[in-house]
Structure formats: structure tokens, C-alpha cells
């Protein structure tokens, strides 16, 4: 049994304890936070639509017309005309045959990934994918090959080694904590060459990138080549919920297979109507996306002017200021709050150990002067927290610079295991909870060397999947029902690479 008090104490000591802060009033560019007015620089309300009058009004009207709740799952009595209307509009927005609403992005990812892979298959997942994708992988009971962030060479190596067992590649389109964009054309090419499906999570791409704000996939011109796009309604579209855009057959399949859709209450009518109104605004006013991108560029250049080295996608609204240590990130967050800027500190397991950060997010509704002032305030906050902006390095640089993996992380066939804390059990305490693998003695002898050991050793007699032992874990005497489903079993046999659960 989990010792709750001890675990909470441990989190406090590690500087990883979390608490919620209270926002009064709607989510706008400025909010009252714990009683104090601040500039909000960490919301995903990218286009400023969550508090837009037309969106609010549509939600209020829908509550009067359709009521507040949908009453049941989509598959029981929950599918209402307003759901169908939004699905049609989203399908046409995404230029796909069909769209299917889910309760949230978390549910959509869990539902899609666990429906498209099963025990014995291999899912290929970027090391920095969102936790909902990680959980979908776990629930699928498939083996999971976690490729190094955006590294198509590593991915191809894994696809080769999987020897026909590959089911799908899954990636964030825009990475939620780093703001960079997945190498989508290359992923499409690999998916086609190795005959696996491609799922792209556009949670942070929809409304922020691409023609008409249609996302990273549209921006890369590969809309027709991606099997499933997951989009969310709770970020740029200012509401709550999510959708999957795909072809008709896939939509039919997910309606029958995605447990997160089947066994969860349909989205609430006010949220659906709010998203419909937001979608109309996005389509009618594409300049909102341009304003967002201009604001993101402005914040980046203002931060650079303050001495910060800023990474992430050149035009995505997510700007990470990587501070390294969790305590430093927390301190900087507090110092920024004292200066009227709210930029939440993001720590493991949301980001890998040693890359705690302030994750800044820009909104189209921020003014230029607000962003200039924020950059100045952040530089002062960093200094007050004992950090010089010039000494900080963006995540990509840190990936390369850091040669040793976190303690206990294993090397799989000569490659370092990804340092992604999101693939950890509950949180990364640096004790090596990260990674479950069944190493052969020869590989184990290599030790947890470093990320440098690539290329020559790749696949050199150490395939990641053991043809003899792979396959669904056999039932074991004494396993609980949950363990038998592979949900909590961190020692499921037959897998060389598997997400710790
Ligand atoms: C990349 C990504 N996917 C999925 C989700 C989950 O979406 P939702 O908040 O709608 O559950 C998030 C949300 O934080 C995300 O960042």
C-alpha cells in the first residue's frame, strides 16, 4: 500500500510538491491570482477565445436550449444534435471525412492509442509525448519503443527491429512543454515505408499553426497522410473537450473500440456550443492566428534581448525558459509573481529531470507592451532567484549537453533510454523508476553509458524486441485483475521495452 504521508513528504523534499492556485474571474490575458492582479503567461487559451463574448453567449444559449449535461455516453443517449453539428464542422475544418468528439484530449489520446495497438504490437512514441499518450500506450498493453525526441533515425532503427510488429507511430504535433514541432514529413515517410499508422496530437497546433490555424499537420502539408489527428477544444478553441479527425472507417472503428469514448459521458452542450462559436471565429478571423504568431515572435525576441536563449518552434506560442533545478524554477516563478507575471513552474514528471522550467505561453489577446514588460520582469525574476539569463540553455541544447542519463535509466541495445519523466511511474525521483526493460547480459554489461553510444552499436545483435519471448504476457498465478491487464505490472514478461506503469 502506498504510504501517502511519506510520499507527500518526499515530494516536498524533492521540491516537486504541487498545489493549485486560484484564479478569480474568466481566463483573460490578465487575471486575479490568489487575490492579486497579474499578467497570465501560462494559459493555453491561445486565441483569447475562452472569455470572448460570442463564445460565452453561445455557451449560455446552449445551456438554455440543450441543458447543461449530456446525460450519458455518446453510445447510450448522449449524442445530441449539437454534438453532430460540431463534428460536421470539425471534419470540414480539418478536411477529413469524419470527426468524433471525446470528453477531453486526455480521453481522446488514451482512447485512440489503446484502440489502435494491442498486446504483441509495438507502438513508437516520442520521448516527449504528452502523458495522455503515454497512458494510452500503457493501456494498450503493446510494447512501446520510445524514440529519442524528434529523432527519425532512432525511430527508423526501432521500426526495423520491430520486424513487422509495428502498429503505430504517435507524436505530439507541437510539443507541449518545449513548443517545438514534430518532424511530420519524415514521420509520414517512415509510417508509409514501414506500413504503420500515424497518429498526431494537435492539442497545441490547432488554432496556432498552419493555414487557417489548421495545425502542424496542415502546416507541413501532410493532411492526407496522417491516419488520425487528435485536436482539443480546451486550448485555442477556448472551451473543453476534444476530437479525432479521420476517415469514416476509422471513426466507425473508434466508436466501437475506444473505451474512453464508449464509457464516458458525452461533452456538455455549453462546452460544445462554445467550441462551435470559437471555431466560427477562427474561420472568420484568421488574423487571430497571425496576431498570436506575431506575439510569440515578439516575446521570443524580447526575451533574447534580456539575455535568454530561447528555443522551441520559431512561431509556436509555447516558449520554455529552462532553469534546470525544480527549486530554482519555483523560486523564479514566485519572483515573477511578485513582479506581476504568472508563468507556472513546470517540474518532473511533466518534464525530464534537470529541465524544470517556466513554460511561457502567449495569447493573441496580449498586448505588445504587456509582453515587453513581461520579458523584463522575467529577467529580473531570474536574477532575483539567483540565475543569470545568459547561463540558461534551452531544452534541445541540454539534451545534447547532458551526457549521463538519469540515475538508473537503462541502455537499450547501446542507446540511452529517454530521460522522459512522463514515462515514469508516478514521478521521477532520480532513482531509476523510469524505464522497464529486459536487458540481455551483453547489453547490461554496457552499462548505462551515455547518449553518445549510437550508430555503430545500433542493432548490433541486440534487437529491442526479443522474438522468442515477445508477445502477450502469459497469465501468472497470483496476479491481481489489474496486473493481468498489464496496467500495474512493471514486470510483464515478454517485453524488452515497456513503459513503466
Ligand atoms: C499535447 C497534449 N495532448 C493532450 C492534452 C490533454 O488535453 P485535455 O486538456 O483536453 O485533456 C494536453 C493537455 O494538456 C496536451 O498538452
Image (cartoon, rainbow, N blue to C red):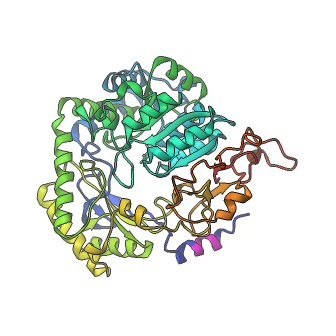
Please state the horizontal and vertical placement of residue 32, each as a whole percent of the image. 28, 62
Camera sees residue 366? no
Please state the horizontal and vertical placement of residue 501, each as a whole percent of the image. 65, 53
Whether residue 495 sits left or right of residue 271 in the image: it is right
Specify the principal SS of the magenta part: helix
Camera sees residue 161? yes
Q: In the displayed orientation, state which residue is furthest to the left.
A: 369
Please state the horizontal and vertical placement of residue 146, each as a whole percent of the image. 55, 48
Say whether residue 475 is magenta: no
The vertical placement of 403 against 128, above or below, is below
Residue at position x 24%, y 68% from top? 308
Residue at position x 70%, y 58% from top? 442
Whether residue 210 sits left or right of residue 495 in the image: it is left
Q: In the displayed orientation, state which residue is furthest to the right.
A: 477
Name the one closer to the observer, 229 or 170.
Answer: 170
Quarter of the image for residue 31 reads bottom left
Name the one closer to the observer, 458 or 402.
Answer: 458
Whether residue 215 sits left or right of residue 339 in the image: it is right
Whether residue 104 sits left or right of residue 445 in the image: it is left
Count of marks placed on residues: 0
Quarter of the image for residue 210 reads top left
Residue at position x 51%, y 37% from top? 169
Quadrant where the image shows the N terminus: bottom right
The vertical placement of 383 against 319, above or below, is below
The vertical placement of 32 against 392, above or below, is above
- Residue range highlighted in magenta: 5-10
Residue at position x 47%, y 48% from top? 129
Please state the horizontal and vertical placement of residue 500, each as a whole percent of the image. 64, 54
Amino acid at each position: 500500500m502506498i504510504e501517502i504521508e511519506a510520499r507527500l513528504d518526499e515530494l516536498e523534499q524533492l521540491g516537486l510538491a504541487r498545489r493549485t492556485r486560484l484564479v478569480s474571474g474568466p481566463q483573460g490575458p490578465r487575471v486575479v491570482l490568489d487575490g492579486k492582479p497579474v499578467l497570465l503567461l501560462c494559459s493555453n487559451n491561445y486565441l483569447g477565445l475562452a472569455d470572448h463574448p460570442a463564445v460565452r453567449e453561445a455557451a449560455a444559449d446552449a445551456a438554455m436550449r440543450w441543458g447543461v449535461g449530456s446525460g450519458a455516453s455518446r453510445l447510450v443517449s448522449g449524442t445530441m444534435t449539437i454534438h453532430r453539428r460540431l463534428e460536421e464542422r470539425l471534419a470540414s475544418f480539418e478536411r477529413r471525412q469524419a470527426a468524433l468528439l471525446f470528453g477531453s484530449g486526455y480521453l481522446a489520446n488514451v482512447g485512440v492509442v489503446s484502440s489502435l495497438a494491442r498486446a504483441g504490437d509495438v507502438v513508437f512514441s516520442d520521448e516527449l509525448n504528452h502523458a495522455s499518450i503515454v497512458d494510452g500506450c500503457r493501456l494498450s498493453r503493446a510494447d512501446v519503443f520510445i524514440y529519442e525526441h524528434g529523432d527519425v533515425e532512432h525511430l527508423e532503427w526501432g521500426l526495423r527491429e520491430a520486424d513487422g510488429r509495428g502498429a503505430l507511430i504517435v507524436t505530439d504535433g507541437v510539443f507541449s512543454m518545449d513548443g517545438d514541432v514534430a518532424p511530420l514529413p519524415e514521420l509520414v515517410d517512415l509510417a508509409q515505408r514501414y506500413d504503420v499508422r500515424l497518429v498526431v496530437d494537435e492539442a497545441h497546433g490547432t488554432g496556432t499553426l498552419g493555414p487557417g490555424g489548421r495545425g502542424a499537420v496542415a502546416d507541413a502539408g501532410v493532411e492526407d497522410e496522417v491516419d488520425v489527428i487528435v485536436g482539443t477544444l480546451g486550448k485555442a478553441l477556448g472551451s473543453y473537450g476534444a476530437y479525432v479527425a479521420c476517415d469514416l472507417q476509422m471513426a466507425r472503428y473508434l466508436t466501437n473500440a475506444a473505451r474512453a469514448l464508449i464509457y464516458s459521458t458525452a461533452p456538455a452542450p455549453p462546452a460544445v456550443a462554445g467550441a462551435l462559436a470559437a471555431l466560427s471565429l477562427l474561420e472568420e478571423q484568421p488574423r487571430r492566428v497571425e496576431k498570436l504568431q506575431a506575439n510569440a515572435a515578439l516575446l521570443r525576441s524580447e526575451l533574447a534581448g534580456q539575455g535568454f536563449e530561447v528555443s522551441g518552434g520559431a512561431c509556436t506560442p509555447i516558449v520554455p525558459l529552462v532553469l534546470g533545478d525544480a527549486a530554482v524554477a519555483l523560486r523564479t516563478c514566485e519572483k515573477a509573481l511578485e513582479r506581476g507575471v504568472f508563468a507556472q513552474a513546470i517540474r518532473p514528471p511533466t518534464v525530464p529531470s534537470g529541465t524544470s522550467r517556466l513554460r511561457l505561453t502567449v495569447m493573441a489577446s496580449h498586448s505588445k507592451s504587456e509582453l515587453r514588460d513581461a520579458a523584463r520582469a522575467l529577467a529580473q525574476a531570474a536574477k532575483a532567484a539567483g540565475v543569470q539569463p545568459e547561463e540558461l540553455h534551452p531544452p534541445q541544447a541540454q539534451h545534447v549537453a547532458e551526457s549521463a542519463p538519469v540515475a538508473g535509466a537503462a541502455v537499450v541495445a547501446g542507446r540511452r533510454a529517454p530521460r522522459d519523466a512522463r514515462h515514469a511511474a508516478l514521478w521521477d525521483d532520480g532513482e531509476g523508476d523510469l524505464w522497464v526493460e529486459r536487458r540481455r547480459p551483453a547489453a547490461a554489461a554496457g552499462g548505462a553509458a551515455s547518449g553518445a553510444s549510437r550508430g555503430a552499436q545500433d542493432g548490433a545483435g541486440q534487437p529491442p524486441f526479443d522474438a522468442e519471448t515477445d508477445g502477450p504476457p502469459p497469465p501468472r498465478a497470483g496476479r491481481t485483475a489489474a496486473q493481468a491487464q498489464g496496467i500495474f505490472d512493471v514486470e510483464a514478461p515478454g517485453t524488452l521495452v515497456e513503459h513503466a506503469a
